[in-house]
Image (cartoon, coloured by chain):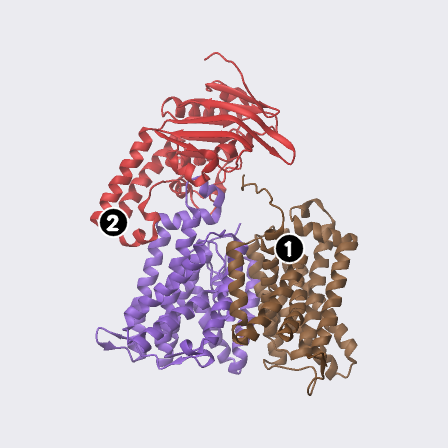
Amino acid sequence: MIQSLLNGVIQGLLLAVVGVAFSLVYSTTRVFHIALGAIYAVAPYVLLAALHAGMPWFVGVGLAILACIALGLGAEGLVHWPLERKRAPPEIHFISSLGAFLVVGQLVVLVWGNDAQVLRTGVDTVYDVAGLRATTGQLMVVVVAAAALASTFAWLRWTEVGLQFRAMASNPSLLATLGRNVRRLRWAVFGLSGALAAISALAAARDVGFDPNAGMHTVLIGVAATIVGGRGSFTGAAVAGLLLGVLRAQVVWHFSARWEDATTFVLLAIFLVFAPGGLQSLTARRTIRVEDAA
Amino acid sequence: MEAATTMEMALNEAARTRGAAASARAMLRDVKIAFGGQTVLDGVTFDLRPGELALLGGENGSGKTVLLNVLSGHLAPDRGSVELQFGERRVDAVRSSPERLARLGLGRLWQDIRLFPSMTVLDNVLAGTAGMLGQNPILAVLALPAVLRQERMARKRAHQNLATVGMADRAQSSCDMLSVGQMKRVAVARLLQMEASLLLLDEPLAGLDADAAEAFSHDLGRLCSKHGKTILVVEHRHDAISRFADRVWKLNHGRLEEIERSHV
Amino acid sequence: MSYFLHLLILLEIYLVVAASLNLLVGHAGLLQVAHAAYFGLGAYTSSLLMTELGVGFLPAVAGAGVAGGALSLLVSLPAWRFRGDAFVMMSLAVQVALFAIFYNWVDLTGGPFGLSGIPKPVTWGIELDTSGSMSAAYGVMVALCIGMLFLLTRSPFGRSLQAVRDDELAARSLGIPARRLKVEAFAVASALVGVAGAMYAAYASYIDPTSFSLDESILMLSMVVVGGTGNLRGPLVGALTLIAIPEVLRFAALPDAFAANLRLLAYGLLLLVLMRLRPQGLAGQYRYE
């Protein structure tokens, strides 16, 4: 039982990172960055390619992260900013993001094939502490994800740019008043989002392997985490990601791995209906809502 | 088919009755509303009686549009009561949704007009028609004869309403080919189609030249005197409308002042 | 010849898929990424009705439609805002949840192995076991569906829906019940795609979850967006394009495995380009303002 809790926390940390990655873009720019699913998928392949080319693993990791940052910046520069300049409605952004997802995702499949891959050969070392077991892969996940989350939140809390991110997230109409800075901030959210997705993808790939579809699947749970946590809240996305990981592990423990996804998304549906503001709204003080007036 | 015809007859009868009882009244009592510490409306009270045309003036940002939003059910005041009367029915605007008030007979002309851009002028007016059987998807397919008949009658009325506002010849135009004044006329025709008895007009004369403003004001006056509509006009340009207005109000720092006038 | 008929039947089925999604996306302005899930719900419902309960083809098709409509009501009736983002999220949730059910409820759906042995349609004593008879019968069914959609879009229902899509605030201020119309449009669209699913199941006589995945939903959405929204020509162009692309690719002698990916890639590019240059799609008339 504690073991499943531990597994849940480990998975939850990965989901927390992905949740924050999605929330970074969605909460600040309201762009439904579904293309993140493809960006996520690219990372392990870049690392694999680097390893096959004989490069040391940390260079490969660096390249993978850079690749995902570049893709994120590309999404903003080539797709979303031009649309934003034409003041396109959110639906257009979403459909374009879908287009980008398809293009990048399918390119991955065409270049590298559809099969599942692994980053390491052989069986992973298992550590046993007081009856709790964890593999090296899982421990790496914990370390990497925790570090990523910690640095992201520290940055959000203590830097000027981070403060602006938080401001954008809690009040998107503030965007306009930030003037010139908006462009730079948007680059930053898209880039950082790509980096976090890469980190999460690489850790997961090291742990359990990867395939082209893992990206969308994980990012969708990240989307769920963003909503459950409350849009506009990065902390919410992280907390919700963690909780979802724990919940999923419990479902696996008590029922079967088959029902992980159904549970996750039925939960999302329930939140959408009964608590659309997410966990954040359930715990926050009552806010007065002004009706949609002209 | 029989059921649809009976239903249709009942609906037409209801519409006629509503049109006949086209007397609407708006009563505000001590309405207060504040945004972020700033008091916008400070104890506004008025009684707009059936068939009256009231002109509401005031500085920019004095809360005129907020008052309209309160009347149309889009905004709930912090304090005070907003009671609307349509014919025999009294309704609390604070507790009602904008759609419900619209169905009872409240029509609003927006400051930015808000015609439906993908539709022709005629379709825009038709969109305002109330009580259409064909709005129900099941009836739209199964009760075709009745639906078509209703549609024909609605079209006739739409053409008449367009004629009333002087836009009869532009029925098939698309909206992006119209001038501001023409768009406003179409919007008014849409309100007529809706058989609204209480009209709230937000800056109807903005963007019109002196002659157009004069003509528009004249037509508004006629809507009251001949058709018995109750109209509240929020407008900067007093000169044109005040001639036709029964009441002239001014919002000053959230308070409503009635300007005494002798009837012309 | 029979290959041509095969394509024709696919076109007929996908025309209903496209036209129903068009009602939702083009007319009601709701982005649905779960259409394949409803398609699958219709397919599984009708197949199970026919194989487990011995129900006839037409009643099974009706059952599929009811299932689609019912699920949509279950999703849309509880009080929540039918606003853009919320709807997309909800449809994502429905898609993934439903797919998980198709894939994992092995006792009912056969899980990854799917359902086989779905009987060919039998109507009025005639078994439609040839491509010719099936394409003709399906042609009639499709004509009925399209006819119904045509009536709907031309009716006050369609006009009010268009008003809501153009400017919901203004529409509501005219008394138009925006929420109710969206619920109804959603129900009609979901019921129709359920019917298309039943037609697909009876034609293929074997179904498995991979035909009802998120990728398929994205493909369907792309089909409608590319073809053009807001009128009836768009879905036809969309369905034709969807079916034509793999055929064209086949001519280029590309391996089948890649063809599917290339089709998705082509759609991705089309979506990106169209959203920049011509958001109303190839044959559409509605412009997202």
> Quick one: which residue is furthest to the top in this view?
B262
Identify the residue position indicated by label 1 in the image: A27
Image location (x, y in percent) of residue A272? 53, 57
Identify the residue position indicated by label 2 in the image: B145
Chain in red (letter): B
In the rendered view, tell whether residue B251 sits above or below residue C43. above
Q: Quadrant of residue B125?
A: top left
Amino acid type assigned to the residue bearing label 2 in the image: Pro
> Quick one: which residue is furthest to the bottom in this view?
A122
Which residue is at the front of the view, A158 or A195?
Answer: A158
Image location (x, y in percent) of residue B154? 32, 40
In the rendered view, tell whether residue C251 sits above or below residue C91. below
**Residue at left offset 58%, top offset 55%:** A278
* Residue A45 in view, yes or no: no
Chain C takes which shade in the image?
purple
SS type, badge 2: helix
Read off the chain for label 1.
Answer: A
Chain in brown (letter): A
